[in-house]
Every structure is written in structure tokens, then in C-alpha cells.
Image (spheres, grey):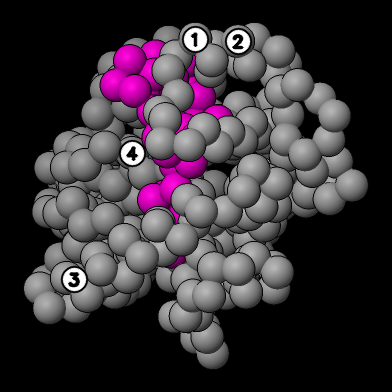
Amino acid sequence: MARAWGIKLGSGGRCVPFCEQHQIVGVGWRNIDPVVLRTATREGLTEHVTLRCPNYTSARERGNAVGQLWRFGRECAIGDYILYYDPPRKQVRICRVTSDAQARDFDLDQAATDIWHLRRVEYPIPPIPILDFYGVLKGRLLGPRSSFWEIRPFAVVDRLAKGAAPNMIAASDPELAAAYQRVRELVVKRAEALNDKDWEWLVADYFKAQGAHVDERRVGGTGAVIDVEARFSRGELGEEVWRVQVKRYQDRQIDWPAIETDFEHAGEDAQFCFVSVYGFTAEARARAEAEDIRLMEAGDFTRFLLSGKVRDRLRQKLALPNLDAGADES
């Protein structure tokens, strides 16, 4: 039976570019013999780690290392999924394993890249922005501090890997999916009716719900570009600043020149997000992707608006049901 795993590709995702260049994922432990990793019993692997890794001074440290190596080299199988988080790009990749464990035999001059035991992978779907990633899995991917661990429930990962949108995972059959779509259309219609200032506060609440600190004294502000500044300072998200421009042009999509002008004044020390309630032109989307600018429109806030995490004043204006009331996503 297939399984799903999480992997950490270096501190702060340092090894992600190397892995994506070669379509691999991997772990370190350069001193571990790849033949032993593939063939030894667990007891044999423990003895090998004890011999080759004298820096582990306690049984707990050795046991933790053996467990991760055993999972990566022996329990993980072809066809399994492996997920990793890419902190610089704030996105999650879902890979499918296409090979047994192998020793790295290329680019050996790049010794600083601590990937020595690898699995070859393919990418069944494009990256998923971490802000949109399914809540049940987000903590299980970002939380562990080990290098390789199992992620459950597998069924959720499998549905994501087969193209299901994160906000549709709860829909278990076509009837539920159709009902959710009708609710989504209602949410978007009511959200579009909010005024400019309402949208600035909605966006502030959205980023706060992702774990960011937002100085509410500065929301909207007097600046020409930044309506919301969100600071992430926990876990794998690291110390990160997002600057957000919010526009509500009635029934009008935003084109690239408007985004480009604001992007040039947003500063180089932060990620830039542009929110356009009524969406973007195709050119704007293509250019924004090339510049690594996050674009969001009314429909992207559907699940958040139904979560009940928006401030009371906006919830009353929207008059929407709270589908997550009393639910625990963890």
C-alpha cells in the first residue's frame, strides 16, 4: 500500500534548487554505506550508524538517525509520495518516487550540498502556495524537525497529487462538490460587494490566520503601495515579510502595468502580494509568475471566509455560514 512522506531538503530549503535540477530528493549521512542502507537489517544498520557516526553520543540520537535512514532507504517505496516545503518560494511540492534508494554519484564537487542518499522523483502537479495548502497537512509538513518522516492521512495527499484543489478536499462525492461550488459562488458574490476598506481588513485577517503578525495601526495607511504588511516569524516560514497591495476596481481586472508600478516601490526586502478583487488579465498572471509576485482575487479567499476567522464586523456584513465552527483542523 502506498504511503506519503515528508522530507526536509537542507536548512531553510538550501538544497531544494539542487534537488529540483536533478529531479531527486535526498538525505545526508555521507558516511553511511549505501549498500548497508539498502540491504542490512535494522540491527545491522544500527551497528553501522554507531560505527560511522561517532558524533551521536546518546542512544536517542543514534535511534533517531537510524529511524530516518530506515524509513528513507527501506520503508519508502516506488510510487509513494514525498512532500517538501520550499521556504524561499513559500510553496509545497508533492513528488512521486520513481526509484529505489541510490548513492549520489554526480556533482560530487558540490560537497556543501548535503544530499548523499537519494530517490528519483517526478512531479505530478505544480507547486502549491503554502498559504493555500490544506490545513490538516500543513502542520504535519512544517512541524517536524527531523529529515524524513511519514505524513498522514495518505488519502488527502493522494487527492492533492491527483489535482484536487486544497479547498475541495472535504468534498467526498460529486453531490458534495456541486454543493460546495454553489456555496463558493455565493461567498465570492458577497465578498465582491465589500468596499475598499473592508477588503484591506479582510486581507489583514487572512494573513493573520496564516500565523503572521500584522500591525493593525498601519492597515490601509497613507502609503501609495502597501495596504498590509505581514511578518512571519515562526517555524519553517522563518523571518519573512510580505507587503500587500489591495485593489477593488468594480468589475475590472488588473493588468500588468499597475502591478509593475507598485512592485517597483514595494522594496527588495519583502515578498510582494497583489490582491485584485475582480481578478487579473492573462498577461498580468504570466508576468507576475515570472517575477515571483503572489496574485490573489476574491475566489482565493473562499475557504478563509467560511472558516469563521474573519473579524465580526465583516462576518456580519457577509452574512455567511461558518462551516468550520467547532472543527479542529489539527
Q: Which residue is mark 2?
A: 261
Between 11 and 27, the residue placed more toward the observer is: 11
Q: CA distance from mark 2 to mark 4?
A: 27 Å
The mark nearer the N terminus, 1 or 4, is: 4
**Label 3 crowd (10 A; few <14 / some 14-19 / many >=20):** some
Q: Give the left or right position of residue 234, taking residue 91 as reference.
A: right
Residue displayed at 46% across by 61% down: 190
Crowd rating for badge 2 (residues with CA inside 10 Å; few <14, some 14–19, many 20+)? few
The tag earlier along the polypeptide, 2 or 3, is 3
What range is drawn magenta here?
274-303
Which numbered dot is residue 127?
4
Crowd around label 4: few <14 · some 14–19 · many ≥20 (10 Å) = some
Q: Quadrant of the N terminus?
A: bottom left
Q: Is residue 106 above or below residue 245?
A: above
Q: Position of residue 309 (x, y in %)?
A: 61, 70
- Which is more foreground, mark 2 or mark 4? 2
Assess disc 1: are there few (<14), some (14-19) or many (≥20) residues with their C-alpha within 10 Å of its C-alpha: few
Quadrant of residue 281 within the rendered picture: top left
Query: Residue 301 magenta-drawn?
Result: yes
Q: Position of residue 104 (x, y in %)?
A: 30, 27
Q: Residue at x 36, y 44 (%)?
A: 128
From the viewer's perspective, tell me whether residue 118 is left or right of residue 245. left
Query: CB of mark 2 within 8 Å of CB of mark 1?
Result: yes
